[in-house]
């Protein structure tokens, strides 16, 4: 649904749906993280948060975009041990770059 909203130009709606999807996957991931480490799920949540931030930015909501990216950075830092160093560095760098282009 988020993709359809974005295609139709409803970036605010897409942003909310991407954020909701990220929350849903993150909650599931948190419950099972210690039992079944799934780096792919962690990366999926981060990507959904980045998609949400991009959609918020396109809808003119820079503060909400920054909030989503800050959540992604926190999630990465809190779960850094689940990723190999190169993947962590690459993904954290991408999120930091996304954050750096958002102007107040």
Image (cartoon, grey):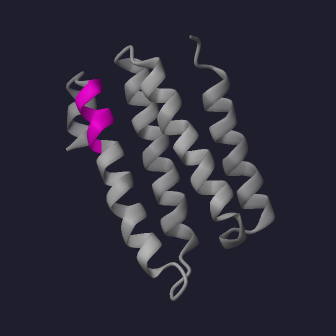
Please determine whether, in this image, residue 5 is positioned above or below residue 42. Answer: above
The image quadrant where one finds the C terminus is top right
In the image, is 46 to the left or to the right of 79?
left
Residue 82 point in image, percent of width and height: 66, 72
Q: Position of residue 45 (x, y in %)?
A: 46, 56
- In percent of width and height, residue 16 lies at 28, 37
Residue at the top extreme of this rendering: 104
Q: Is residue 19 magenta?
A: no
The residue segment tinted magenta is 11-17
Q: Residue at x 45, y 81 (%)?
A: 32
What secondary structure is the stretch in magenta mostly built from?
helix
Q: Residue furthest bottom?
A: 35
Q: Is residue 63 above or below residue 5?
A: above
Residue 79 in the figure: left or right of residue 51? right
Q: Determine the residue positioned at 55% across, 47% down.
A: 72
Location of the N terminus (image quadrant): top left
């Amino acid at each position: 649904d988020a993709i359809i909203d974005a295609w139709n130009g409803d970036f605010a709606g897409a942003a909310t749906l991407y954020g909701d999807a990220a929350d849903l996957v993150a909650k599931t991931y948190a419950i099972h993280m210690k039992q079944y480490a799934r780096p792919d799920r962690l990366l999926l949540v981060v990507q959904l948060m980045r998609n949400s931030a991009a959609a918020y930015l396109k809808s003119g909501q820079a503060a909400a975009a920054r909030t989503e990216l800050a959540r992604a950075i926190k999630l990465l830092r809190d779960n850094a041990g689940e990723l190999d160093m190169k993947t962590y560095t690459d993904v954290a760098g991408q999120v930091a770059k996304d954050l750096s282009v958002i102007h107040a």
